[in-house]
Image (cartoon, coloured by chain):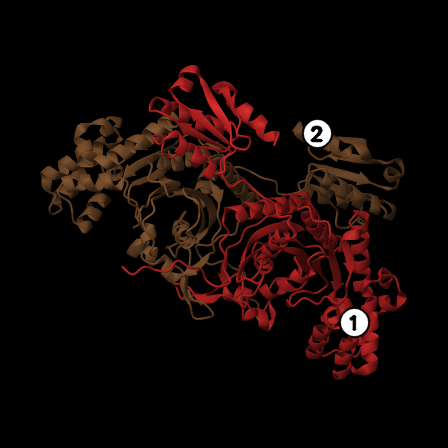
Chain colours: A red, B brown
Amino acid sequence: MVAVEPRLLKGFRDFLPAEQAGRQKMLDAITVAFESCGFAPLSTPAIEYADILLGKYGDEGEKLLYRFQDNGGRDVALRYDLTVPLARVVAQYRDLPRPFRRYQTGTVWRAEKPAHGRFREFMQYDADIVGSASPLADADCIAAGVLALEGLGLDRFVVRIGHRGVLNALLAAAGVQDGKVQAEVLRAIDKIEKIGIDAVRDILASLEPVGHERAGVLLKLLGDADDPSFLTSNATDQLCPDGVAHLRTVFGALDAMGLGRRVSLDLRIARGLDYYTGTVYETTLLDLPSVGSVMSGGRYDTLLETYGVPAIPCVGISIGVDRLFAALVELGTAPTGATGPQAVVCILGDAAFAAGMKLVSDLRRAGLRAESVPEPSARLKKQFEYAARRKARFALLLGDAEVAEGRVTVKDLESGQQTQVAFADLAASLISAISKG
Amino acid sequence: MVAVEPRLLKGFRDFLPAEQAGRQKMLDAITVAFESCGFAPLSTPAIEYADILLGKYGDEGEKLLYRFQDNGGRDVALRYDLTVPLARVVAQYRDLPRPFRRYQTGTVWRAEKPAHGRFREFMQYDADIVGSASPLADADCIAAGVLALEGLGLDRFVVRIGHRGVLNALLAAAGVQDGKVQAEVLRAIDKIEKIGIDAVRDILASLEPVGHERAGVLLKLLGDADDPSFLTSNATDQLCPDGVAHLRTVFGALDAMGLGRRVSLDLRIARGLDYYTGTVYETTLLDLPSVGSVMSGGRYDTLLETYGVPAIPCVGISIGVDRLFAALVELGTAPTGATGPQAVVCILGDAAFAAGMKLVSDLRRAGLRAESVPEPSARLKKQFEYAARRKARFALLLGDAEVAEGRVTVKDLESGQQTQVAFADLAASLISAISKG
């Protein structure tokens, strides 16, 4: 038999216990936030008929689908996000009560070129509201996301909120109606932070039919975008009254919820996905802007039509779990979780075997993380080494004498202290010592 | 644009909120049990190089792999279980501390013929110990699984434990050494419950080289298997001393842990997967035996050799999450979880808007599940209907009068009672009412 080299596909990752325990804590914190906002869980398969996913992500996105023929010759694909499967669910189960507020976490796959921080398999954690055109729905998705990030201890972040309708109106006002030119304009505008506003103005001026004057108007309009007065100025209101009114309520609701300092207006946000129709948002970590958006989303009011059902207004937000976790690690504030036992029971002598096993079982039932040494016949020194290797807080020693007297020798591996504790008091004693740190 | 019919692949499922909330509670309960036993979390990708998975599951199993070429032409496959990826991880990261006790939950894919209770995508929840040949490791995997089932409120179940080495010795003692005949014998033995022992004896007697006499011996040996004295009788001890001694310690440890009544000896268990080498176990729900095993596993001491590393002894247990959940639903004891808000804030009049949004936010921060109506301008009747449709326990009414007086009208939608509560006391008041049921 030829040995197979153990290896991973590029762009895919293993998460070993220390990291995975933290990731799970992070997911738990997001769950708490999303449930507090009235969202309920949904789960959908990883594999869908390919035609369910096609035509949703733009040409560039579609190329990244993991698409293949299954064993029955069906044209299938791995999910690319959690939004399109949600739309499929809503179109398929027509009697779901609406508004339908659902959260979902899961793995998605995109055959991207792997790069620093860019993976082919990663997790998203989404909250969406289906069946409400109200701007309060947009605000509540954003609020849920903000509560999730706050629940992870984050303070220095901002959700930048834009609107595709308003952006289109601004582009039209600058004479840019053609989709291709729009895309070029947006790409140029995206570079303002990188290459400076003058260089961007030059690029824009060189584009047909923008020209120098319209480039100035456009940059002026977009430049005002982070000024809150933008939403109350008559000039912009007239460009796209519905969009501006919608944004005004979104910001008003977030303000009233005490989240005003977490959000800002940024009309330059376009987002690549084809299905967005209204608000769009991205989230920047102020201390790590280079990682890109860790939480994004927007309104998609027409996506369901592709499944032959009447349009149903939808809005959602999606946390990039893996990107966010990597950022938290870099910031030194990633959550941590349990990766092993708090107590290891060391057993000396055959007579102590049964009592030791019972002790392990009792500690577990009392809510402690406990295990026995795997080789109760080994020398005590080896057994203590095992407890230390398992990074347990306590080694509990049980020999014939201890069993006869109904007590156990507790060695605190942090302090080195040894004490004798009666069986009946053991769990409470350990829990008390742990809570004291 | 031609509409695409929203539909699922056969053998794949959506889990809508009520069911998914219960599934998540179930996963949480298993996590608590596995962590209490000192296991730590691992996560591996859904997609592996195909050669990592090949040669592990037997010919029949291998045909069920979702295997395809990725966009870069690589031969890849979706994982079939969580055991082989664990073996790959251990072979790849050679410096993992050992014994390595890991738990992992995740989706696996098998292109089975879909049938009642048989799916192409389903979840497993595994606990394994890598690097210990001790029978205490087998016992602890079983103990972890038993604690998980107990944590889900199950009482009437039994983990049936067998041993491949002992079974092979019994077959050899009956003259059955050929692999093909062994498989036929095991298939026949599997039918004892269905067709009766006499019919099985006839089948066995007709097999070359078993014959009538050896069929009797074999059935006698296997028939004794659920008799605890089997492990202490000299006759069987001599057939396979190592295996019998191993089993003896497994049962001894489980007995000492107070779990003796959860387990029984059943040497007829063979399990299909190629990689098992020692103990093997399956779990029957006594009130639903027809669903098959809900928790299975065993020892696989040679699997790692296929990756060109020295043999490392391993043992594990795997809970069939979806099969178990379906069984709990059938038994009427499936866990349930939150699927919506506890409180819906109804808002009458523009002046109450900001106060209403703040109330929602405050309730969430106090740990309650809360949301506002999406249309604060709607008539009160419609707003109350919304709260009822969301199955909230409370509708909180906020109009101009309430805002002026700093209080809110709380309508308990269960009892119909209405009370007035000051803003400052609201969260505590609701929490108290909820805790009273």
Q: Quadrant of residue B142?
A: top left
Query: Residue A381: image x %, image y %?
Result: 41, 32
Residue B110 in the figure: left or right of residue A84? left
Query: Residue B402: image x %, image y %?
Result: 86, 38
- The residue tagged 1 is A169
A408 lies above or below B413? above
A27 lies above or below A297? above
Tell me the quadrant of the picture where the C terminus of chain A can be found: top right
Residue under disc 2 on the same chain as residue under disc 1? no
Query: Residue B65: image x %, image y %?
Result: 38, 58
Tag count in the figure? 2
Q: Quadrant of residue B251?
A: top left
Amino acid residing under circle 2? Ala
Q: Nearer the viewer, residue B202 or B62?
A: B62
**Which chain hosts label 1?**
A
Residue B37 in the figure: left or right of residue B389? left
Q: Residue at x 28, y 34 (%)?
A: B246
**Which chain hosts label 2?**
B
